[in-house]
Image (cartoon, rainbow, N blue to C red):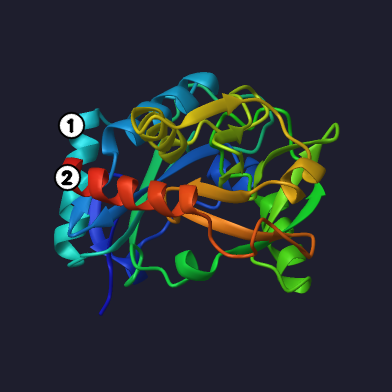
């Protein structure tokens, strides 16, 4: 089946979709993106993704070519046209096409692209029952990780380093403390306390992160937003990550050292259950 995609106001078959070679997303990674999950044919936390998208655009002084209502309609039409029951919708907005120049061009129309990815078993990912293995690497990204830009080369390198080490992902370390995973926010649990890096320019303000921390507090779990070290993580009772595509995913090993019992912990397992239950109820 050929996917229907969305490019600059038009729905069309994926093999007919094109973007200019002068697009600044291609030439400068001058663009932002969001990924929204689909469960039971409905969008998960769409409003949160739309709000973060606007913030990223504002930080880069980039125009938004759509309203939130228009964007919602596009998402829903792509779900319908591609019969997505479970999967992801990728959205990318760039500054647009212009002659190559480092300075921002004036009067340029932004480029907007959306496409779907069917992901059967997204909610029932078997990894949730066995847990992920991660390695630690130096965080060599630029300083504004709070802007969700399309410049993802170093996270890709981190994924490949993890793969070469027989792990699933990498946690990045800067100034001796963990920032985040290559495509997720990182957490450890010690006693009855969930510990995760506080928001700032150093990490992305995860939409799933915000929901999970709210749910944790509502469930009377203690949350401490502060940096932690890899050594702390190795000595933790359990660990996990959150993202739009993995929801809450247990981490059972860091740099070859088993975390806690070496199996998914009770906190991560419970938070995943709560998250999926509440998000399904609130999906639109």
The location of residue 98, given as percent across then percent down, is 54, 36
The location of residue 28, given as percent across then percent down, is 64, 41
Asked if residue 185 lies left or right of residue 8, the reply is: right
Identify residue for label 1.
Answer: 69
Disc 2 secondary structure class = helix
- Indicate which disc, 1 or 2, sits on the residue closer to the N terminus: 1
Relative to residue 208, is residue 266 depicted above or below?
Answer: below
Categorize mark 1 by other alpha carbons within 10 Å: few (<14), some (14-19), many (20+). Answer: few
Asked if residue 280 lies left or right of residue 254, the reply is: left
The quadrant in which residue 4 appears is: bottom left
**Which residue occupies the foreground of this view, 115 or 232?**
232
Q: Is residue 98 visible?
A: no
Categorize mark 2 by other alpha carbons within 10 Å: few (<14), some (14-19), many (20+). Answer: few
Separation of marks 1 and 2 at Cα, in angstroms: 21 Å
Identify residue for label 2.
Answer: 281
The location of residue 71, given as percent across then percent down, is 24, 38
Relative to residue 109, is residue 25 depicted above or below?
Answer: below
Residue shown at 51% from the left, 30% from the top:
205
Give the label, 1 or 2, closer to the camera: 2
């Amino acid at each position: 089946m050929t996917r229907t995609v969305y490019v600059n106001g038009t729905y069309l078959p994926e093999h007919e979709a094109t973007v200019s070679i002068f697009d600044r997303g291609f030439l400068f990674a001058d663009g932002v993106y969001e990924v929204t999950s689909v469960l039971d044919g409905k969008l998960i936390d769409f409003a949160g993704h739309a709000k973060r998208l606007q913030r990223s655009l504002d930080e880069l002084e980039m125009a938004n070519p759509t309203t939130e209502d228009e964007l919602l309609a596009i998402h829903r039409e792509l779900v319908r046209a591609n019969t997505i029951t479970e999967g992801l919708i990728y959205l990318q907005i760039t500054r647009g096409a212009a002659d190559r120049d480092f300075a921002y061009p004036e009067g340029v129309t932004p480029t907007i692209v959306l496409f779907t990815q069917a992901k059967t078993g997204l909610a029932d990912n078997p990894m949730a029952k066995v847990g992920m293995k991660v390695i630690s690497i130096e965080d060599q990204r630029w300083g504004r990780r709070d802007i969700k830009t399309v410049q993802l080369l170093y996270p890709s390198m981190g994924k490949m380093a993890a793969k070469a080490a027989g792990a699933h992902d990498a946690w990045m370390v800067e100034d001796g403390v963990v920032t985040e995973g290559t495509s997720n926010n990182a957490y450890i649990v010690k006693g009855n306390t969930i510990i995760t890096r506080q928001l700032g320019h150093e990490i992305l303000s995860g939409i799933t992160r915000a929901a999970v921390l709210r749910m944790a507090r509502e469930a009377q779990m203690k949350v401490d937003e502060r940096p932690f070290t890899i050594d702390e993580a190795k000595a933790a009772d359990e660990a996990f990550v959150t993202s739009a595509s993995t929801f809450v995913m247990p981490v059972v090993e860091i740099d070859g050292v088993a975390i806690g019992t070496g199996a998914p912990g009770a906190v991560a397992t419970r938070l995943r259950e709560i998250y999926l239950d509440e998000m399904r109820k609130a999906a639109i």
